[in-house]
Image: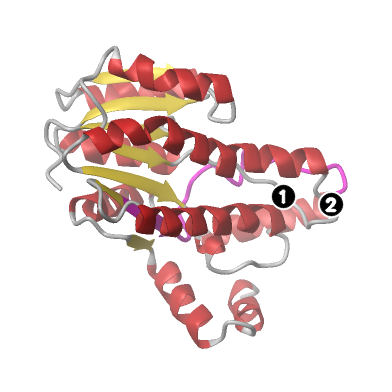
């Protein structure tokens, strides 16, 4: 897919993978509509991509807000001629086991990671189908391949994203819209720092989780962003990011039931 002169909508664009994807797209002269709940972060990303001479618009909103999502395509088309790429990168996390996570926190996570992504897809699919060459990109996770203890809510949401993306890819097979599901592992973003912490989670459990996150999250968002954009250009159905993602993808195929015992040996090092 040739990206110069195209227009991409990127959610979660204020930081992390979303920002990195936006910058990599801008390097290819792709125009951008940036979406995030963080206005300051959006403006910083906009300043970064504007140096590449592309048209940029910022849309400060929560993808969990159904009314805001429904109004977004018109707002984007007021500035841009159309939409050729949608990157659903917005995501949140919650610390704790299933029993520690409240219904409210579980539903909040799903409202962003799943329902927000689905609504964004539904809202922009007509514009994507109107393009002669379009791409829908959904960010899942390595926890959409495996489901470690302590990740019940997050893993459930990312399995949902992967399943939704694969089914939609088959449904859109004979249209101009291709679907890419991205499976990153170990990317050093702020999602763990910004994750909600249940009241039932002890300080010791929280600090242990943070230490594990700092140890495992080493891959730069910039590398992840560039890998994703290359996947868009190459029209890949699946993009694995990082050595850990490739190893875990292989592991879960070889040991679909006992992978967790093997992973624990690595995580506890």
Percent position (x, y) of residue 119? 51, 34
Which segment is the magenta one?
179-200
Instruction: Please say whether residue 254 is one of the residues in the magenta stretch.
Output: no
Q: Nearer the viewer, residue 98 or 195?
A: 98
Instruction: Please say whether residue 197 is one of the residues in the magenta stretch.
Output: yes
Question: Considering only vertical position in the picture, is 30 above or below 73?
Answer: below
Residue marked by disc 1: 95
Quadrant of res 133:
top left
Quadrant of res 147:
bottom right
Q: Residue at x 61, y 72 (%)?
A: 267
Secondary structure mostly seen in magenta is loop
Q: Nearer the viewer, residue 39 or 138?
A: 138
Q: Residue at x 66, y 42 (%)?
A: 109
Q: Indicate the secondary structure of the residue bearing disc 1.
A: loop
Q: Is residue 60 visible?
A: no
Percent position (x, y) of residue 91? 54, 41
Quadrant of res 77:
top left
Q: Is residue 75 visible?
A: yes
Instruction: Calculate the distance from the C-alpha at mark 1 to the C-alpha at mark 2.
Output: 9 Å
- Position of the C terminus, as image quadrant, is bottom right
Classed neighbour count for the residue bearing mark 1: other residues with Cα under 10 Å, few (<14), some (14–19), many (≥20)? many
Q: Nearer the viewer, residue 9 or 124?
A: 124
Q: Quick check: marks 1 and 2 in contact, CB under 8 Å?
A: yes
Q: Residue at x 34, y 60 (%)?
A: 239
Residue marked by disc 2: 100
Q: Is residue 29 left or right of residue 246?
A: left
Whichever of callouts 1 and 2 sits on the residue coming sooner in the sequence is: 1
């Amino acid at each position: 897919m040739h990206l110069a002169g195209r227009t991409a909508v990127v959610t979660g664009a204020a930081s992390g993978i979303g920002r990195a994807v936006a910058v990599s797209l801008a390097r290819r002269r792709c125009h951008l509509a940036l979406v995030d709940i963080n206005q300051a972060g959006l403006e910083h990303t906009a300043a970064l991509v504007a140096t590449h001479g592309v048209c940029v618009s910022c849309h400060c909103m929560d993808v969990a807000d159904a009314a805001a999502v429904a109004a977004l395509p018109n707002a984007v088309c007021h500035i841009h001629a159309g939409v050729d790429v949608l990157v659903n990168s917005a995501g949140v996390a919650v610390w704790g086991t299933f029993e520690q996570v409240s219904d409210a926190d579980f539903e909040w996570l799903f409202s962003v990671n799943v329902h927000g992504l689905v609504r964004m897809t539904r809202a922009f699919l007509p514009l994507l189908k109107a393009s002669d060459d379009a791409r829908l990109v959904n960010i899942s996770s390595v926890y959409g391949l495996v489901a470690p203890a302590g990740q019940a809510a997050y893993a459930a949401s990312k399995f949902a994203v992967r399943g939704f993306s694969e089914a939609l890819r088959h449904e859109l097979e004979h249209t101009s819209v291709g679907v890419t599901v991205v499976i990153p592992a170990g990317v050093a973003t702020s999602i763990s720092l910004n994750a909600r912490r249940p009241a039932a989670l002890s300080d010791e459990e929280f600090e242990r989780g943070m230490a594990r996150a700092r140890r495992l999250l080493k891959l730069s968002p910039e590398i992840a962003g560039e890998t994703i954009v290359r996947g868009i250009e190459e029209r890949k159905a699946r993009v694995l990011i990082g050595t850990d993602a490739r190893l875990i993808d292989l592991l879960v195929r070889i040991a679909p039931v006992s992978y967790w015992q093997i992973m624990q040996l690595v995580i506890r090092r």
